[in-house]
Amino acid sequence: MEIDNHMSMDKRLAELKERRQKIELGGGADKLAKHRSQGKLTARERIAALVDSNSFQETGLFAEHRAVLFGMAGKEAPADGVVTGAGTIGGRLIHLASQDFTVLGGSAGELHSTKVAEIMAQSLKTGTPFVFINDSGGARVQEGIDSLSGYGKVFHTNVMLSGAVPQISLICGPCAGGAAYSPALTDFVIQTRQAQMFITGPQVIKQVTGEQVTAEQLGGPDAHMVNSGVIHFIAENDEEAALLCQKLLSFLPSNNMEDPPVLASDGNVDPNPVLNDIVPDDPKQPYDVRDVILNVIDNADFLEVQSGFAPNIVIGFGRIVGRAVGIIANQPAYLAGVLDINASTKASRFIRFCNAFNIPLLTFVDVPGFLPGVQQEHGGIIRHGAKMLFAYSAATVPKLTVILRKSYGGAHLAMCAKDLGADRCFAWPTAEVAVMGAEGAVEIVFRKEIQEAQDKAARRKELIEEYRKVFANPYVAAGRRLVDDVIEPASTRFVIAQSLEYLNTKRELRPAKKHGLIPL
Ligand code: HXC
């Protein structure tokens, strides 16, 4: 568009409007129609769904790329394929970037990534969360290593933000190649059913390995929720992704120097008798630990994180009398709640997130131990299980542990035992704190005696009972002060609320160092 330096203000305003409207149309009517036909919102509509109305302030609307090779000279790329700016959610400031697939496939050229990195820096300077809405074919191939360099800036800035402000990625379309690594560096990833995420696509995989796989099988939301553990939430569509992001942010402080927002609460902590009947009398019978969580937190409002990955451990956010807590709970309804490699990495990462953002940890324990097996040992259960020990020990936020039933061996320690720094450890009367289960213990201690017995089965049973009588209760542990109190399950909400209140001013200093060395 030519510039006439002698235009009247009216004409200038008309020109401004025209330029703005053209850019806001993104890649044009045809591309928008194709995009919408896939059930997707546009980059700008996604922003509108996320932030408070009229709160969005855009940066870099008129940005233009300077690429000239491979047909790029003079090629229009409105906003260079990414909308960046600031807005509010429920009145709280965030910064964001939203890639526009209708513009060169949302591909990330040098300017595109510079815009993203610049708005991320604003997040850090202002101490506010960063949300990145991804919809991109990856590095803009025409710009070669300049686009690679752009990604480098984004990744580096992701790491600068890490632990200082919350970072959330929404994956709303393709997220290919380099595009997948920025989300991987953020704290939470929400993927829609219309999106696929991978480093190398199906065609390259077929060429290199001969494997045949569809994009959906390779990098659809189910693949990443169940198999890879890369994502934390699945959203049915863009609108739901925005709602999930808003909900998630409601539990989080804006930065690591603040506490999470405290919501108004009626303060009700009356006994909840339902809790007395959740753990079955038979110690081998499973139950759903989410029933415990829902009956302890405010309004049964639990935001479960990574629900489809390693379901033997449940993690997520809830509130107790308005205060946000990060909940970690063994799930006896799946693999008896055992700790395995995936459960350990899932929970450890969550614990570290909560600690970084001043969210107290509430741990519910019913764990028979670490999962035995060659696959687990060779997969590195020693290294991964150690992450739990590290993450809990390193955490300085208030740490509250409630032992519901089994709490055996190394897994007892790994689920935030007092010796790992739990500020309070409560046990239900059904709790069993022991070095291992009675069946296993008897095989080790009394093997000879059982072998020599006339009726081996009867003697084994007798010895198991004897061992259980000594250790299958919370009182030995309470006697050693490994448990602070044995409580009626119905009173759990009251006890946790009181503990959070008393620990609100907790400060715990650690030796000065660059950083600890979690076993990665
Ligand atoms: C430039 C791209 C592009 C890219 C897509 N486009 N990806 N342009 N660079 N990386 C363009 C297409 O040419 C097309 O332009 C438009 O975007 C829409 O793409 P389509 O292919 O028509 O859309 P669709 O059929 O929906 O397929 C989407 C897709 C596919 C699955 C993302 O485009 C694709 O496979 N792209 C390449 C993905 C990839 O290999 N990325 C890795 C890049 S290298 P026109 O003008 O025809 O509409 C990388 C390394 C960085 O990222 C490493 C850093 C660590």
Image (cartoon, rainbow, N blue to C red):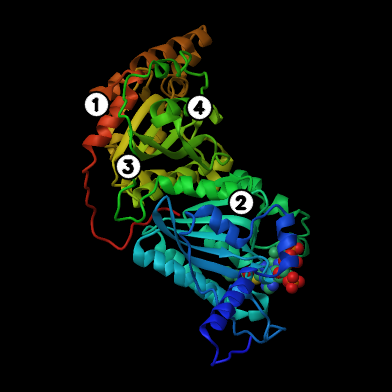
Please, what is the three-letter code of the amino acid marked with disc 3? Val
Say whether disc 2 or disc 1 marks the residue closer to the N-terminus: 2
Please rate how many residues cluster around mark 4, counting C-alpha atoms within 10 Å: few if below 14, some from 14 to 19, many from 20: many
Q: In x, y percent, where is residue 179?
A: 59, 65
Residue 291 badge: none
Could you say whether the residue bearing mark 2 is in a helix, strand or loop?
A: helix
Please, what is the three-letter code of the amino acid marked with disc 2? Asp
Please, what is the three-letter code of the amino acid marked with disc 4? Pro
Residue 181 shown left or right of residue 156 in the figure: right
- Residue identified by numbered label 1: 480
Between label 4 and label 1, give the one nearer the viewer.
Answer: 4
Residue at mark 2 to residue at mark 1: CA–CA distance: 53 Å
- Whether residue 367 is visible, yes or no, is no
Please, what is the three-letter code of the amino acid marked with disc 1? Arg
Please rate how many residues cluster around mark 1, counting C-alpha atoms within 10 Å: few if below 14, some from 14 to 19, many from 20: few
- Residue identified by numbered label 4: 332
Residue at mark 4 to residue at mark 1: CA–CA distance: 26 Å
- Residue identified by numbered label 2: 238
What residue is drawn where x is 47% and y is 45%?
Answer: 247
Residue 412 shown left or right of residue 14 in the figure: left
Between label 1 and label 3, give the one nearer the viewer.
Answer: 3
Disc 4 and disc 2 in contact, CB within 8 angstroms: no
Residue at mark 4 to residue at mark 3: CA–CA distance: 31 Å
- Residue identified by numbered label 3: 262
Say whether disc 4 or disc 2 marks the residue closer to the N-terminus: 2
